[in-house]
Image (cartoon, grey):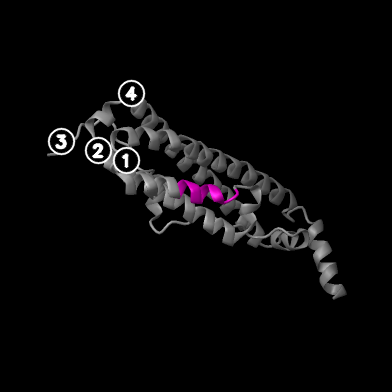
């Protein structure tokens, strides 16, 4: 046991022990995660006005409107805290809830294609533009977070910095995963320029 600690102390004394890198990477993750949460919150804040506007023109689309409202409530029930990035189970639930909300929003936008008057409403068009911008920001923020976690996890797993990580309690952090990797760089399409055919 004494030999183990002697080796460990010797390793930590090396210039390449990785402590400063771990600190730097950890701070980068926290910063990137804060931006992810900010953008998801921005999207959540847009939804009530979007649903209200759509309801004014397409009240009969109850299932779709309810789906968006319920998905927003589910996503909002998960506390968006810095601690999420240290809990793989909670992180997975957070990601699933946000993915469900993305799907509900996509279905809502598809439905709006059937209502030309709604699409021509200035308020609705403004909300769509804001939503499109937010989805793009979410994609950018997620990609930055993914890269930050990849760098951090590599340091945690690599020798000799893995010994430093073990001593100071740094553990591998969960990351975003998608069944279709292209989904990361392809936010939901918000096309408010085309004019659909008038439904019969």
Q: Secondary structure at mark 2?
A: loop
What is the distance, in whole Å, between disc 1 and disc 3 at their CAs?
16 Å
Residue behind mark 2: 113
Pick whichever of labels 4 and 1 is earlier in the sequence. 1
Pick whichever of labels 1 and 3 is earlier in the sequence. 1
Q: Is residue 72 left or right of residue 38?
A: left
Q: Is residue 117 left or right of residue 197?
A: right
Q: Seen from this angle, which residue lies furthest top?
A: 122
In the rendering, at what x and y percent does residue 78 appear? 57, 51
Q: Which mark is residue 109?
A: 1
Residue behind mark 4: 122
Residue behind mark 3: 197
Q: Secondary structure at mark 4?
A: helix
On-image quarter of the N terminus: bottom right
In the rendering, at what x and y percent does residue 86 appear? 64, 56
Callout 3 environment at 10 Å: few (<14), some (14 to 19), or many (20+)? few
Q: Which of 56/166 is in front?
A: 56
Magenta stretch, residue numbers: 71-79
What is the distance, in whole Å, between disc 2 and disc 1 at their CAs?
7 Å
């Amino acid at each position: 046991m004494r030999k183990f600690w002697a080796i460990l102390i010797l390793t930590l004394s090396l210039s390449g022990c990785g402590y400063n890198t771990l600190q730097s990477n950890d701070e980068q993750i926290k910063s990137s995660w804060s931006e992810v949460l900010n953008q998801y919150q921005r999207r959540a804040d847009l939804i009530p006005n979007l649903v209200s506007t759509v309801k004014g023109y397409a009240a009969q689309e109850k299932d779709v409107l309810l789906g968006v409202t319920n998905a927003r409530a589910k996503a909002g029930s998960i506390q968006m805290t810095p601690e999420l990035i240290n809990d793989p189970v909670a992180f997975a639930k957070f990601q699933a809830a946000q993915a469900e909300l993305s799907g509900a929003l996509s279905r809502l936008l598809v439905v709006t294609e059937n209502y030309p008057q709604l699409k021509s409403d200035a308020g609705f068009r403004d909300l769509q533009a804001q939503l499109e911008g937010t989805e793009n920001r979410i994609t950018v923020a997620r990609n930055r977070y993914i890269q930050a976690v990849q760098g951090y996890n590599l340091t945690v797993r690599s020798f000799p910095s893995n010994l430093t990580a073990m001593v100071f309690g740094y553990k591998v952090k969960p990351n975003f995963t998608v069944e279709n990797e292209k989904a990361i760089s392809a936010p939901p399409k918000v096309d408010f320029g085309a004019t659909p055919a008038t439904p019969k």
